[in-house]
Amino acid sequence: MHQCLPVFFIKMFIGGDFPKEHIEFFRSRNIDLKGLEVIENGKTFHWKGTYEYNMNQAHTLDTQLNVFQNFQPKIPVVYREAEFVFLANIDPDLQLDVLRQIKNPKFTACDTMNLWINQKKDKVLEVMKNTNMVFINDAEARQLCETYSLPAAAKHILNLGPLVVIIKKGEHGALLYTKEIVFSLPGFPLEEVKDPTGAGDTFAGGLMGFLAETGKVTPGNLKKGIVYASVMASYNVEDFSLDKMSKLKSVDIEWRYEAFKNLTSFE
């Protein structure tokens, strides 16, 4: 397999209240924590929300930025040589700042949310123009592009400059668009969903991790990658927080990948 520097800069900015056992868990999985910053006298970012019958839609009850309010990412020197870079969902000004610190990435991707589309749409568009792949959910795509049509929204974003657009549809799966191909993958049918929080980040991690491990961004690899991304997200929602992911084994991932193939193949 292709070897590269970390896919994700574990550029975490946390307060002294962040449970130490979680940090130790990261270390136990050989996750590089050079980018971890702890503000001992501060509090970690806090979000509180609810999900109703439609588990695709989160209702925010409380958001406390805490230490994140003054976050200024300083990328460790070793991370600046990374080939695959994912700009997670933060202020688009900060995403651009991170991107400027990376020397010569092979492939970059970004995520966003309705908050930034409402408050900083021009900056969101600038980030998209400067990355190779965009992750966005269906409601955000419609909002950003001012159209109900997801194919039209994808075309609009592709025309900004990205090579790939991934539109996430929650339990209904995901759409992959490039200027050459369209690929639609259903969501994995689950009898019980306990906590959808973090599913989008898990999805992005699964896809970017696969691309970085293989070192190839081809139509075939993008399709395989989106299946692995959906596998990871489907496991994430089956339990609260990282409880399911912390127990996950490679054999579980490969089993569900094969189940996806059986689910979508026909003659």
Image: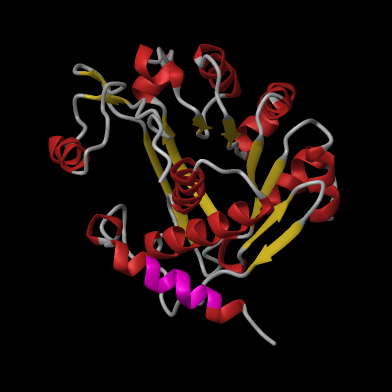
Give the main secondary structure of the magenta stretch.
helix
Q: What residue appears at the point 21 percent right and 33 percent down from the top-left corner?
A: 18
Horizontal arrangement in the rendering, residue 121 relative to residue 238 (left or right):
right
Residue 59 position, x and y percent, is 52, 51
Q: Specify start and end residues of the magenta stretch as a single range.
A: 254-261
Which quadrant does the C terminus fall into? bottom right
Q: What residue appears at the point 28 percent right and 23 percent down from the top-left corner?
A: 36
Q: Which residue is most to the bottom?
A: 267
Viewer-proximal residue among 148 and 216: 216
Colour scheme of this structure image? Answer: secondary structure
Residue 256 position, x and y percent, is 42, 72
Horizontal arrangement in the rendering, residue 133 relative to residue 197 (left or right):
right
Q: Is residue 148 visible?
A: no
In the image, residue 100 sits, relative to residue 47, either above or below, namely above
- Image quarter for residue 120? top right
In the image, residue 216 sits, relative to residue 151, either above or below, namely above
Is 167 covered by the magenta stretch?
no
In the image, residue 221 sits, relative to residue 133, either above or below, namely below
Horizontal arrangement in the rendering, residue 227 relative to residue 79 (left or right):
right
Q: Is residue 204 visible?
A: yes
Residue 172 position, x and y percent, is 62, 68
Is 257 covered by the magenta stretch?
yes
Q: What residue appears at the point 70 percent right and 45 percent down from the top-left corner?
A: 165
- Image quarter for residue 170? bottom right
Residue 10 position, x and y percent, is 34, 30
